Amino acid sequence: MSGFTDWVETVADSKSAPDYRSKVTDAETVSMWQSLSSGPNYKAANCVAVCPAGEDVIGPFLEDRKGHLASVVKPLQEKSETLYVVPGTDAEAYAAKRFPHKNLRRVSNGLRVPTVESFLSNMPHVFQRGAAKGLEATYHFTFTGAEEARVTVEIRGQSLSIEDGHTGEPDLVMTADSQTWVRFLAKERGILRALLTRRIRVRGRITLLVAFGRCFPTG
């Protein structure tokens, strides 16, 4: 599972035990309980296993890097297992190409943004360069209501830049009530209703907003 929040929501949304088991395997349920009892590092077991960081393990790695890769890293790379990926991400594309023998399961990234400020601060972390290929656009965002902000977002050359205020000539202008936007990101409110009620207003090609969304998939 992608995280505790997703797991809890899956339990809450399940109509019965069979319905839950149709969404989550027994192995995944056991894994979640093990991680809850063993601490967060349990989910990073493979990462910890291959990482030679630390004075007590860095020596053998520096002396024989090829040996470390052959005896520690490669067996885990070749292992048949399930990889959890957020759909539409660079990680999904890489995993499918690099590890075709592994089973890919699509999940949400579990990210929840309770405020416009957290939305803006998290954008660089979830930006997908692959999805941004071919997109060259400048966005002017204005948030009103409980949180007020004016931001320029530029996506060019598969790179992202965010600036306070409005700069440059925009390809798309969006004005949104901040609480409506946060609820939309949480999938608690549809974009169509927000547009019809003018809680979100867009000037420019709506396809640019769709392309923008693809650069920040959440699953």
Image (tube, rainbow, N blue to C red):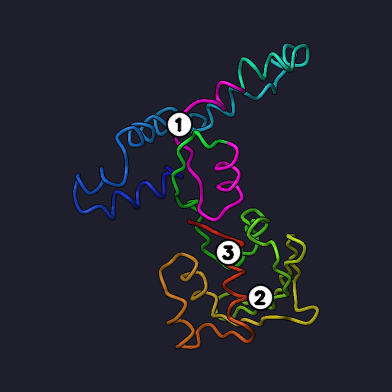
The secondary structure type at the circle numbered 2 is: strand
Residue at mark 3: 214
Q: Nearer the viewer, residue 4 or 145?
A: 4
- Residue 195 rendering spot, x and y as whole percentages: 49, 84
Distance, label 3 to label 2, CA atoms, is 23 Å
Name the residue type under label 3: Arg
The secondary structure type at the circle numbered 3 is: helix
Residue range in magenta is: 74-98
Give the side of residue 173 with respect to residue 187, left or right. Answer: right
Q: Which mark is residue 81?
A: 1
- The reply to whether the C-beta atoms of the residues labelled 3 and 2 are less than 8 Å apart is no
Residue at mark 2: 149
Which residue lies most toward the right here? 168
Name the residue type under label 2: Ala
- Residue 61 rendering spot, x and y as whole percentages: 73, 16
Is residue 32 shown above or below 67? below
Q: Earlier in the sequence, mark 2 or mark 1?
A: 1
Q: Earlier in the sequence, mark 3 or mark 2?
A: 2
Distance, label 1 to label 3, CA atoms, is 28 Å
Does the magenta portion include 95? yes
Is residue 121 shown above or below 174? above
Which residue is found at the position 38% from the left and 29% from the top?
A: 34
Q: Earlier in the sequence, mark 1 or mark 3?
A: 1
- The reply to whether the C-beta atoms of the residues labelled 1 and 3 are less than 8 Å apart is no
Which residue is found at the position 26% from the left and 46% from the top?
A: 22
Name the residue type under label 1: Glu
